[in-house]
Image (cartoon, rainbow, N blue to C red):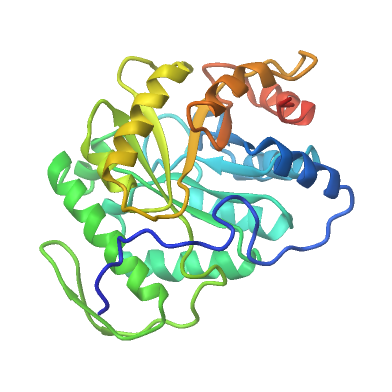
Amino acid sequence: MRLGAGTPARVQGVGGTPAKTQSVAGTLAGMRRVAEAEVRFAAGVPNVGSFGDPLLLTDLAVAAEDSGWDAFFIWDHLLYRDQRWPVADPTVVIAAVAARTSRIRFGVLMNQLARRRVGKVARESVTLDRLSGGRLILGAGLGSVPEEFTAFGEPGDLRERAARLDESLEVLTELWRGEPVTFHGEHVTVTGVTMLPSPLQQPRIPIWCGGRWPNKAPFRRAARWDGVMPTHTGYGLGETMPPAELAVVMRYIREHREDGAPPLAVALEGRTDGAAADRGGRNVGAYREAGLTWWVEALGWWRCDPAGAMARIRQGPSLLN
């Protein structure tokens, strides 16, 4: 097994361009807008409650592509706090998204890898990457609902989940290489496994890590990979940290990122006014100065019902000067 799996590497398409671009009528103008703006725009939705419907989620993704968005992301929950709420499996949903779209990037933000088998994730992710022509982004986080672990006999302790996550990421990226892998960690074991084919995106599918500031460890992890999506303990569901706070997060990450590493994708969830002339672009622009590269329009029950989410998506992403 090669060492250095966590060393940042230049990933084809990490900034938003798929490894294999497919022609889609009407997308060239949108792609020029993205190149000029240096910030890309995604629609982000939960996979639970009134949004826990796979047909709805797939339709939202198709509408996002048709309306000029650059990506579509969904949450990862197996259960939610109220277990009477419907839940849609996110991996199945993004497979449908891959099949019904041809341009936008997509992914699960954030995959709770600590409760998943790394071999299965390796197979799923490569299949999704190839199915989509190289458009998958793989999110990785610890999860926010410990019961999703403990209810099924998995350890819920944060430190153990973090250790499992780090080992899983190391093994996952090695399996993607298509070469023999042997790894004996504290939590993950792989013995003499070669998995083919490899992803279309090289040297790997981009990995974005989540974290809740001011907890520092998740951001040291993010500094080793390809992207970060921070939240903040001082701001709850439906709230976004101000640009000054994002700048503090980015300063910390830069202090721990290897010299010469490629630029990091920086994603942040927030809310813009689709009815405004610039569809909220002025608000997003303030975050660009702090290092933002991806704005994720957060759409969920705390803000609107599914019809409201569809309406906001159809208005299109924000416009930047």
Task: Check the image and name the residue furthest to the front.
Answer: 260
On the image, the x and y values in percent for residue 75 come to 47, 39
Q: Image height check: is 179 above or below 308?
A: below
The residue under the point 38% across, 33% down is 250
Placement of the C terminus among the 4 image quadrants: top right
Closer to us: 249 or 298 = 249
Expressed as whole percent of the image width and height from the top left, the position of residue 195 reads 40, 81
Horizontal side, residue 1 vs residue 205: left or right: left
Based on the displayed image, in which of its 4 quarters is residue 179 positioned?
Answer: bottom left
Quarter of the image with the N terminus is bottom left
Is residue 56 visible to the viewer in this orientation of the structure? Answer: yes
Residue that sits furthest to the right in the current view:
25
Is 24 rendered above or below residue 130?
A: above
Going 32% across and 39% down the picture, which residue do you hit? 253
Q: Residue at x 22, y 34 (%)?
A: 216
- Residue nearest the observer in this picture, 261 or 205: 261
Point 72% across, 24% down: residue? 312
Q: Position of residue 310 (x, y in %)?
A: 72, 29
Question: Residue 287, position in %: x, y?
Answer: 53, 24
Q: Is residue 173 left or right of residue 186?
A: right
Q: Quadrant of residue 314?
A: top right
